[in-house]
Amino acid sequence: MRVLIIGGTGLISTPMTGMFLERGDDVTLYNRGVRPSRVADGAQQVHGDRTDFAAFEAQIAALGPFDCVVDMVCFDPLEAESAVRALSGRCGHYLFCSTVDVYQKPYLSYPVREDHPLAGNNTYGRNKRLCEAIVLAAHEQGALPATILRPAHTYGESSGIIHSFGWDTAYIDRLRRGKPIVVHGDGTSLWGSCYIDDVARAFVAAAGNQVAFGRAYNLAASEWQTWDDYHRKAARAIGAPEPKLVHIPAELLASIAPQRASAAADNFLYSNIFDVSAAQTDLGFRQTVLWEEGVKRTVAWLDANNRVQNSDDDPLPDQVIAAWERLGAAMRQELV
């Protein structure tokens, strides 16, 4: 199979590229060339900027037809429209990497199925929803056979471990040193995390799979846990002491640090439980790496590449905790 991956050096697309190559596919990666590939030689590299639409479309046309194109870096409706122009008549199957953030929140029922109403609580989710509509319209018009894949929280080598203040790896250092951990809300909302290899394997299984044409699939964890357990298991995975968890309202965190904690209010606050039965049936999707094992692998890679930050260089969590405890004590003194 002749495969084009738009992206190819990111979190999911790195193991995906390796899997296509191991399968014997002819793989081309199209990206800006900013981030080096961590995949062994074997894929052709083509550099360009997909947001320069005319140049991008000319490059894709020159590369020739592909059996499958996997689009990992389409985030804007204009980019989706450009992809449709570039690939119509030149692509046997188009896989669009979307996100579970396209769904309306609060969720209406659990687990969240692919036919749940779409809306998006943030710019990222709303734009992905609009991209999906453009891609599916092209599919329905017969211009571009397409499948929508909606990963949830995906993590692994090269990523941090997501937490209430984002992806920074100082969180890992905090765990190791027994520093308290800020947890949004009361820590009881449910969350699932899926290791990159499991998600990448589903993309590879979808490529050229006619059963998947015109469909959307959730690619999310089957292992659900509260955020409190998420942090406890992460600490256990790296041999850290059980953490002291400090619960602070998600909306307050988002207002204090909007650049780092907005997801706490528009995403983490809700229980994120997704139905993956369709992907299991059609794509053979399975979660084979559970959270603690995935954390061990991820942190081992971060350690080997000197990527764990010193938590002393990030004072915000301690400042927030100190203010929360001080103001809470003052409130108790005033009202009790």
Image (cartoon, helix red, strand yellow):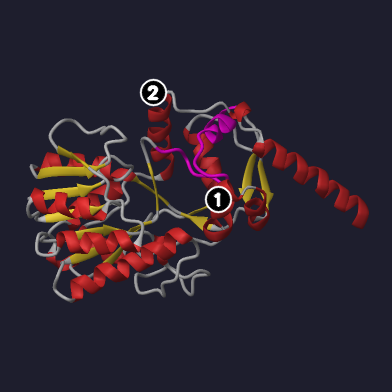
Neighbour tally class for label 2: few under 14, some 14-19, many 20 plus, Cα within 10 Å: few
Q: Is residue 56 visible?
A: yes
Residue 281 occupies which quadrant of the picture?
A: bottom left
Q: Is residue 171 magenta?
A: yes
According to the picture, the residue beneath numbered tag 1 turns out to be 227
- Magenta region includes residue 279: no
Q: Amino acid type of disc 2? A: Ala
Closer to the camera in the image, 90 or 9: 90
Q: Dot 1 lies on which element?
A: helix
Q: Residue furthest front?
A: 54
**How far from the left and from the top, in percent, is residue 56?**
21, 51
Q: Point out the stretch of residues depicted in magenta.
A: 159-177
Expressed as whole percent of the image width and height from the top left, the position of residue 258 reads 60, 51
Q: Residue at x 8, y 42 (%)?
A: 24
Callout 1 amino acid: Trp
Residue ID at (17%, 76%): 141
Whether tag 2 and tag 1 are in contact, CB under 8 A, the answer is no
- Relative side of 307 to 59, left or right: right
Q: Nearer the viewer, mark 2 or mark 1?
A: 2
Image disc number at residue 304: 2
Main secondary structure of the magenta stretch: loop
Position of residue 198 measured from the top left corner of the image (x, y, whole percent) = 29, 48
Image x and y of residue 150, in percent: 33, 60
Q: Marks 2/1: CA distance? A: 27 Å
Identify which residue, 129 or 162, lies in the foreground.
129
User: From the viewer's perspective, is 336 left or right of 199?
Assistant: right
How crowded pointer 1 is (Cα within 10 Å; few <14, some 14-19, many 20+) is rated as many
Query: Which quarter shows the C terminus?
Result: bottom right
In this rendered view, identify the residue nearer to me: 314 or 275. 314
Q: Quadrant of residue 133?
A: bottom left
The earlier-in-sequence mark between 2 and 1 is 1
